[in-house]
Image: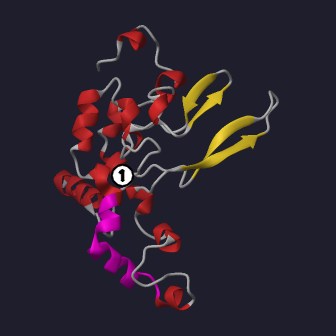
C-alpha cells in the first residue's frame, strides 16, 4: 500500500475512501459539511493501492460489461434462452438486450452502467439530505461502469468496509459469480475437493 502523505497518519474510515477524486466523480455531493462520493470506484482505490488496481484493470473481468454488450454470441444466447412467450408479449425485442433480459441474465455479476441522472432529497431529523439519483444502483457487477468513468469494483471480491484479503481468497467468494450453468468453475472446485478427500 502506498497511501499519499496526507492520508498516512489517518485511520481509514468512511471519509478516506468516499472523498477521493471528488473532481472526477459525478456522484459527489455535500453531506453534513463535507463532500463525498456515493460510489467508491477503482479510481479511488488506486489512490492507496496503485499496483493492485493496475493489475485488476489489466484483467478480463473489469471489461465484463463490455464483453456482454459487444459479444454477438451472448446476444444470441439471450435470444434463444428466454422464452418465446416473452417475445410474443412484447417484453423482449429479438436481437436487442433490454431491461427485461438484463434482469434475467448475467448482468448482476457482470455489472451495468451507473450514471447520475439528477439528485433527490431524503427527509431526516437534521433536515433534508440531498443525494445523487443513480441509475442501476446498487450494483456489485465486476465490470460495472462507474460515474467517474472507471470500470469495475474492487469490493466484488474484497467485501466493502472489511476489505478482507482472506475473504477475497476464499473459493466461496469466487463462487458467488463463477457458478453453473455457464461458468461452472466453483462447482468444479467443489467436486475436486470431494474427489481429493476420497
Question: Residue 128 falls in which quadrant of the image?
Answer: top right
Residue 161 visible within the image: no
Q: Secondary structure at mark 1?
A: loop
Q: Is residue 56 left or right of residue 44?
A: left
Q: How is the image coloured?
A: secondary structure
> Residue 143 in the image: x percent, y percent?
36, 52
Q: What is the number of callouts on the image?
A: 1
Q: Nearer the viewer, residue 130 or 181?
A: 130
Query: At x 41% / y 50%, what residue is drawn?
Result: 145
Q: Residue furthest top?
A: 9
Q: Which residues are magenta?
A: 66-83
Instruction: Say whether residue 148 is left or right of residue 48.
Output: right
Q: Please identify the quadrant where the C terminus is shown.
A: bottom left
Residue 85 magenta-highlighted? no
Q: Residue at x 35, y 48 (%)?
A: 172
Instruction: State whether residue 145 is above or below residue 168.
Output: below
Q: Main secondary structure of the magenta part?
A: helix
Q: Check disc 1: other Cα within 10 Å, few if <14, some if 14-19, many if 20+.
A: many
Quadrant of residue 107 within the rendered picture: bottom left
Instruction: Identify the residue at image location x=51%, y=26%.
Output: 19
Residue at screen point 65% across, 28% down: 31
x then y, percent, for residue 174: 32, 49
147 vs 181: above or below: above
Which residue is nearer to you in this view: 2 or 175? Answer: 2
Residue 102 on image: x %, y %:
47, 68
To which residue does mark 1 refer? 143
Question: On the picture, is 52 further left or further right than 91?
Answer: left
Amino acid at each position: 500500500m502506498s497511501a499519499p502523505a496526507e492520508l498516512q497518519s489517518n485511520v481509514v474510515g468512511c471519509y478516506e475512501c468516499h472523498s477521493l477524486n471528488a473532481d472526477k466523480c459525478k456522484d459527489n455531493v455535500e453531506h453534513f459539511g463535507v463532500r463525498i462520493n456515493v460510489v467508491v470506484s477503482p479510481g479511488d482505490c488506486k489512490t492507496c493501492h496503485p499496483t493492485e488496481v493496475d493489475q485488476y484493470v489489466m484483467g478480463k473481468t473489469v471489461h465484463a460489461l463490455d464483453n456482454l454488450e459487444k459479444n454477438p454470441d451472448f446476444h444470441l444466447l439471450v435470444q434463444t434462452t428466454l422464452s418465446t412467450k416473452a417475445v410474443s408479449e412484447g417484453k423482449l425485442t429479438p436481437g436487442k438486450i433490454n431491461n427485461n433480459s438484463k434482469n434475467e441474465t448475467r448482468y448482476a455479476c457482470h455489472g451495468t452502467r451507473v450514471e447520475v441522472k439528477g439528485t433527490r432529497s431524503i427527509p431526516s431529523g437534521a433536515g433534508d439530505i440531498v443525494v445523487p439519483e443513480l441509475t442501476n444502483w446498487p450494483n456489485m457487477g465486476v465490470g460495472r461502469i462507474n460515474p467517474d468513468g472507471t470500470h469495475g469494483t474492487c469490493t466484488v471480491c474484497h467485501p466493502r468496509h472489511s476489505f478482507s484479503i482472506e475473504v477475497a481468497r476464499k473459493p466461496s467468494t469466487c463462487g458467488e459469480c463463477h457458478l453453473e450453468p455457464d461458468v461452472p468453475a466453483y462447482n468444479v472446485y467443489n467436486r475436486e475437493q470431494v474427489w481429493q478427500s476420497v
